[in-house]
């Protein structure tokens, strides 16, 4: 186990490397989920594993709701992290239609995180894709077999290989705190090199009620920062996103100084303009970063523009629903 002094030295080095390759900016990335169902549902850290057999495959969102959420993201200048949901929820042509609609309104291609896709599926989705995300979670084989028994790594490797052949960008997710050690960083480093990963989402375990991790504490913030810093040092130009849970917002400055580019996981709509949201923006300042967009103030200058788009798309009902959640705090800029 590394001591605090050593970790802080590594973080300081990572911060220097970040400043050399990036502007002093940060932002929030929001994932848009399309369902509450997963055909696998046995990843031992995941909330969905507690609902296996209890949630219908039809527990999926309407496209109108997803489009409205996307407009809220555009309004607030929140970047789109990725489109995600449970495995095997939509048929290929259904999901392709969803991607087409979201990409058209977003006016950009999208990242998707929906499991290990075949080359045929990637070819179908390619017109709307910026990249694919491999939800690896951990590269320690023994731990992976235990926590993700029905989600092996090999199909993801094949997906990443196919994506490379098709010119699609590659990203991955890992979760810190599943039982790995610092020695496992070598596995991550090799994997990033092998698959030319350009973006990585580094989350810290958030123990979910009903899972085997329910009573396990989240990893020490310095340990989370260590993984980010080591990744930044090894890959100076990689895009690193740090997952921030509601009770971990005071760690933001630390994770940004460790070399993270952006933040995710925070329930930004439900806790818009809350003390936690304000803390995130404050922490960004502490880290010497300008926060793009806002988690606390509605962008009034663009509100009419996006409300008009919602009217044109005939989704004002859903857009108004999201706006009502944001305006409870009267956070108009």
Image (cartoon, grey):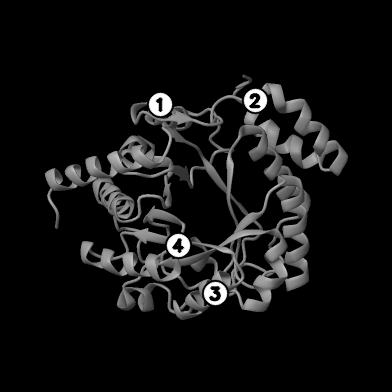
Rounded to the nearest whole Å, what is the CA distance between mark 3 and mark 1? 39 Å
Rounded to the nearest whole Å, what is the CA distance between mark 2 and mark 4? 34 Å
Q: Given this view, does label 3 or label 1 mark the residue nearer the observer?
A: 3
User: Which is more N-terminal, label 1 or label 3?
Assistant: 3
Q: Residue at x 53, y 44 (%)?
A: 29
Residue named by callout 3? 159
Q: Are marks 2 and 3 in contact (CB under 8 Å)?
A: no
Residue 299 tag number:
2
**Relative vertical location of residue 43 with respect to residue 201 in this rendering, above or below:** below
Q: Residue at x 40, y 26 (%)?
A: 282
- The N terminus appears in which quarter of the rendering? bottom left
**Relative vertical location of residue 222 with respect to residue 43 in this rendering, above or below:** above
Quadrant of residue 188 within the rendered picture: bottom left
**Relative vertical location of residue 204 with respect to residue 290 in this rendering, above or below:** below
Residue named by callout 1? 282
Residue 197 tag number:
4
Left or right, 61 with respect to 144, comes to right
């Amino acid at each position: 186990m590394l001591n605090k002094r050593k970790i802080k030295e590594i973080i300081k080095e990572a911060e220097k490397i970040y400043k050399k390759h990036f502007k002093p900016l940060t932002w929030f990335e929001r994932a848009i989920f399309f369902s509450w169902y997963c055909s696998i549902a046995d990843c031992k850290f995941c909330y969905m594993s507690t609902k296996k057999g209890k949630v219908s495959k039809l527990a999926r969102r309407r496209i109108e709701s997803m489009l409205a959420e996307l407009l809220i993201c555009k309004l607030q200048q929140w970047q789109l992290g990725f489109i995600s949901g449970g495995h095997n929820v939509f048929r290929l042509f259904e999901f392709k239609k969803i991607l087409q609609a979201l990409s058209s309104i977003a006016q950009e291609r999208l990242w998707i995180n929906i499991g290990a896709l075949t080359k045929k599926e990637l070819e179908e989705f390619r017109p709307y894709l910026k990249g694919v995300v491999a939800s690896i979670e951990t590269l320690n084989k023994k731990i992976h077999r235990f926590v993700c028994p029905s989600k092996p790594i090999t199909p993801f490797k094949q997906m990443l290989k196919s994506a490379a052949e098709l010119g699609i960008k590659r990203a991955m997710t890992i979760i810190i705190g599943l039982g790995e050690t610092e020695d496992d960083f070598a596995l991550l480093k090799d994997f990033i090199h092998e698959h030319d990963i350009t973006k990585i989402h580094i989350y810290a375990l958030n123990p979910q009620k009903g899972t085997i991790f329910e009573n396990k504490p989240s990893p020490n913030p310095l340990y989370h920062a260590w993984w980010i810093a080591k990744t930044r040092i090894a890959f100076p130009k990689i895009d690193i996103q740090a997952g921030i849970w509601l009770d971990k917002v005071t760690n933001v400055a630390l994770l940004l100084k460790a070399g993270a580019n952006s933040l995710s996981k925070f329930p930004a709509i439900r806790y818009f303009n809350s003390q936690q949201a304000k803390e995130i923006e404050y922490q960004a300042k502490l880290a010497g970063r300008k926060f793009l967009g806002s988690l606390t103030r509605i962008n009034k200058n663009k509100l009419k523009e996006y409300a008009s788009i919602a009217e044109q798309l005939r989704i004002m009902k859903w857009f108004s629903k999201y706006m009502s959640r944001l305006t409870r705090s009267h956070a108009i800029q």
